[in-house]
Image (cartoon, rainbow, N blue to C red):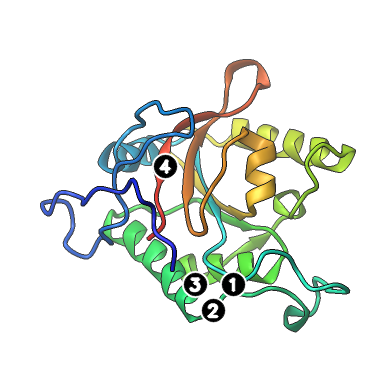
């Protein structure tokens, strides 16, 4: 299972059950982001979203002719991906972080990631996989920005989506199982990236 090469071991005084891969990282621009304890505090403060790429699913694209209604026709998590999803949920539980909502792309690998990590999940088409640069992608990005701006202080949400969708939203690449902690930008521009939760 791929792990962040830039991950540093988390201080043992945090929580002994926290996966070692959940640690300090740098943004794609090379600017040091908040470390994980600070990101946990940022989520507690609210008005934020932890936007994850789905956990590890072997392959690159869905098979030709796949349908959203039939998981067997899609690219899905393997056992490593399922274990990764559970570790994501375990970290949030260990930190005492309870999202006010968990929203997922309607693709099965995203729903399974969210369900294994958090339980109840709301399917949301805006988190579905996009083709960057299309009108549909622009519409989805606008919907995501609007939703992010509506998350109130004292609450945070978890979103589970895809590499292409998160890239369209923020212009940042993400690894399988990696989370981006986001806040809305003034004026409705690209979200503010507070930091990354590297793959568990």
Which residue bears the numbered disc 4?
Answer: 196
Residue at point 73%, 65% (across, down) = 61
Residue at point 44%, 63% (across, down) = 2
Question: How far from the left and from the top, in percent, is residue 17?
Answer: 22, 65
Query: Dot 1 lies on which element?
Result: loop
Nearer the observer, disc 2 or disc 1?
A: 1
Q: Residues within 10 Å of mark 1 (few under 14, many from 20)?
A: few
Residue 176 shows which numbered tag?
Answer: none
Between discs 4 and 2, the one toward the N terminus: 2
Question: How far from the left and from the top, in percent, is residue 198?
Answer: 39, 50
Residue 78 shows which numbered tag?
Answer: 2
Determine contact: label 3, label 2, CB under 8 Å: yes
Residue at point 18%, 57% (across, down) = 15
Measure the C-alpha gap from mark 1 to mark 4: 22 Å
Q: Decide which of 195, 4 is in the foreground and name it.
A: 4
Q: Residues within 10 Å of mark 3 (few under 14, many from 20)?
A: many
Determine contact: label 3, label 1, CB under 8 Å: no
Q: From the viewer's perspective, tell me whether residue 93 is left or right of residue 102.
A: left
Name which quarter of the figure residue 94 lies in: bottom left
Measure the C-alpha gap from mark 4 to mark 2: 23 Å
Determine contact: label 2, label 1, CB under 8 Å: yes
Between discs 3 and 4, the one toward the N terminus: 3
Residue 58 shows which numbered tag?
Answer: 1
Which residue bears the numbered disc 3?
Answer: 81
Question: How far from the left and from the top, in percent, is residue 121?
Answer: 60, 64
């Amino acid at each position: 299972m791929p792990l962040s090469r830039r991950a540093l071991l988390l201080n043992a005084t945090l929580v002994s059950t926290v996966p070692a891969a959940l640690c300090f990282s740098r943004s794609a621009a090379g600017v040091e982001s908040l470390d994980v304890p600070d990101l946990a505090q940022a989520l507690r403060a609210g008005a934020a979203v932890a936007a994850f790429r789905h956990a590890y699913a072997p392959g690159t694209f869905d098979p030709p002719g796949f349908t959203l209604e039939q998981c067997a026709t899609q690219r899905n998590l393997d056992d490593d991906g399922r274990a990764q999803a559970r570790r994501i949920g375990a970290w949030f539980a260990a930190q005492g972080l309870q999202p006010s909502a968990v929203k997922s792309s309607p693709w099965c690998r995203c729903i399974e990631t969210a369900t294994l990590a958090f339980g109840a999940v709301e399917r949301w088409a805006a988190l579905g996989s996009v083709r960057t640069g299309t009108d549909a992608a622009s519409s989805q990005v606008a919907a995501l920005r609007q939703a992010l701006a509506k998350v109130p202080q004292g609450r945070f949400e978890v979103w589970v989506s895809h590499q292409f969708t998160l890239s369209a939203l923020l212009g940042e690449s993400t690894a399988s199982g990696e989370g981006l902690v986001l806040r809305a930008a003034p004026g409705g521009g690209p979200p503010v990236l507070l930091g990354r939760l590297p793959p568990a």
